[in-house]
Amino acid sequence: MIDRKTIESVARLARLEINDLEAEELATHLAKAIQHFDAIAKVKTDGVEPLITPIEIKAYYREDVVVKDFTAEEMTENAPEKAGNLFKVPPVV
């Protein structure tokens, strides 16, 4: 069972400030969520193979080819401001 002390510990780790009423409410909600996981854990899965996707998908791989379509000058020719072959942007503080 999830008690208020556990909730307060988790809240402290998450750097959250919660009052006593919120801690009790969260403990109730978390206990209900854990009950759902317990119900799922009771489902018999013996003999069931792990599933990555619900349907069989044939892997499609393409060759990774480097293609140089544009030069640096072509990519920056419409830039409002540039410094050499680089885009000039406002400084970020």
Image (cartoon, rainbow, N blue to C red):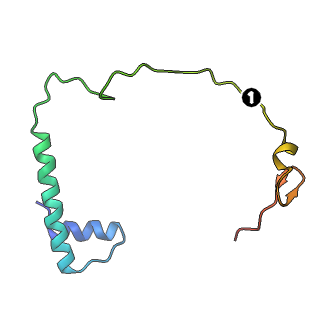
Query: What's the amino acid at mark 1?
Result: Val
Q: Position of residue 73 (x, y in %)?
A: 88, 45
Disc 1 packing (10 Å; few <14; some 14–19; many ≥20): few
Q: Residue at x 74, y 28 (%)?
A: 67
Q: Residue at x 14, y 29 (%)?
A: 45
The N terminus is located in which quarter? bottom left
Q: Quadrant of residue 27?
A: bottom left
Q: Position of residue 31 (x, y in %)?
A: 13, 60
Q: Is residue 87 left or right of residue 20?
A: right
Q: Quadrant of residue 11?
A: bottom left
- Say if 28 sits above or below 87 in the image: below
Q: Quadrant of residue 81?
A: bottom right
- Say if 76 sits above or below 31 in the image: above
Q: Position of residue 32 (x, y in %)?
A: 13, 58
Q: Is residue 84 left or right of residue 59?
A: right
Nearer to the camera, 8 or 51: 51
Reading the image, the residue beneath label 1 is 67
